[in-house]
Image: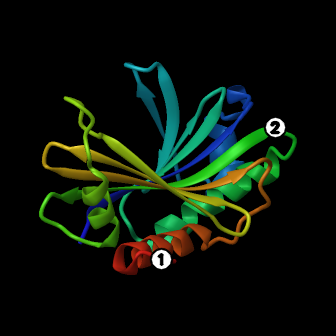
């Protein structure tokens, strides 16, 4: 089916990056023992910094916190959600506008599923213009599922976003796993 998913959680708000020190991340957010260390990371191109521990990267910015999860191991995905909950719990007064659980999938042009079939059918141009992106929305209980599909040179890039507006509650540790299972259902039969 789809090749390597890219997983992230993004909380849009007004964050104080100075709180995100190595000591605070290690002791409060990750709750690591003394013998464990977090790795500091620096993105010189964007002048961003963050922290990495095992397969989780935390990137604090003034307007967002991004938690990236490497791979698709369920325990790492749950750990990423636990980290989000720790940040939300310890910085409960931070104004949050929205929060999204994001999964990006890349598909070859030859692959097929109900979503890709809908994208292929809607890929109608206008004059000399080609349609590049399509968006599908579904309002679920307390969140919106947004699927942004774009045509790439060798296939399709599909971004699934499960968006919660406003200050979210603490999430069940397996909420991201549940959303990924919803994606699998969408790709299998077009519904959740």
Would residue 42 appear left or right of 78 to someone viewing this image? left
Q: Is residue 52 visible?
A: yes
- Label 1 sits on a secondary structure element that is loop
Describe the element under mark 2 as helix, strand or loop.
loop
In percent of width and height, residue 175 lies at: 61, 70
Image quadrant in which the N terminus is located: bottom left
Residue 33: image location, x then y, percent: 62, 58
Left or right: residue 122 versus residue 163 is: left
Count of numbered tags: 2
Q: Residues within 10 Å of mark 2 (few under 14, many from 20)?
A: few
Alpha carbon distance from label 1 to label 2: 33 Å
Residue 33 visible in the snapshot: no
From the viewer's side, name the closer residue of 1 and 121: 121
The crowd level at tag 1 (other Cα within 10 Å; few <14, some 14-19, many 20+) is few
Q: Nearer the viewer, residue 170 or 152?
A: 152
State the image coordinates of residue 79 (x, y, percent, origin top left). 56, 64
Q: Residue at x 76, y 51 (%)?
A: 88
Q: Nearer the viewer, mark 1 or mark 2?
A: 1
**Label disc, if present, on residue 95 of the rendered structure:** 2
Disc 1 + disc 2, Cβ < 8 Å: no
For the point 25% across and 58% down, the residue is 120
Look at the picture and state if 4 lies above or below 112: above
Camera-side residue of 46 and 30: 46
- Residue 114 lies, with reference to residue 144, above or below; the image says below
Marks 1 and 2, the one that precedes in the sequence: 2
Q: Is residue 69 above or below residue 151?
A: below
Question: Which image quarter: residue 139?
Answer: bottom right
Residue 39, image x and y in percent? 46, 41
For label 1, the residue is 191
């Amino acid at each position: 089916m789809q090749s390597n998913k890219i997983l992230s959680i993004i909380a849009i708000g007004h964050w104080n990056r100075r709180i995100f020190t190595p000591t605070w991340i290690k002791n409060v957010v990750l709750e690591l023992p003394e013998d464990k260390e977090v790795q500091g990371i620096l993105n010189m191109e964007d002048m961003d910094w963050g922290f990495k521990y095992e397969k989780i990267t935390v990137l604090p910015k003034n307007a967002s916190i991004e938690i990236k999860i490497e791979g698709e191991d369920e325990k790492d995905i749950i750990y990423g959600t636990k980290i989000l909950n720790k940040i939300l719990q310890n910085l409960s007064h931070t104004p949050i506008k929205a929060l999204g659980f994001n999964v990006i999938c890349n598909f070859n042009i030859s692959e097929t599923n109900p979503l890709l079939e809908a994208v292929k059918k809607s890929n109608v141009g206008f004059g000399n213009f080609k349609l590049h992106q399509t968006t599908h929305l579904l309002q679920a209980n307390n969140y919106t599922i947004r699927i942004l599909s774009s045509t790439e040179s060798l296939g399709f890039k599909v971004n699934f976003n499960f968006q919660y507006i406003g200050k979210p509650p603490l999430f069940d540790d397996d909420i991201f796993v549940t959303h990924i299972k919803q994606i699998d259902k969408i790709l299998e039969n077009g519904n959740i």
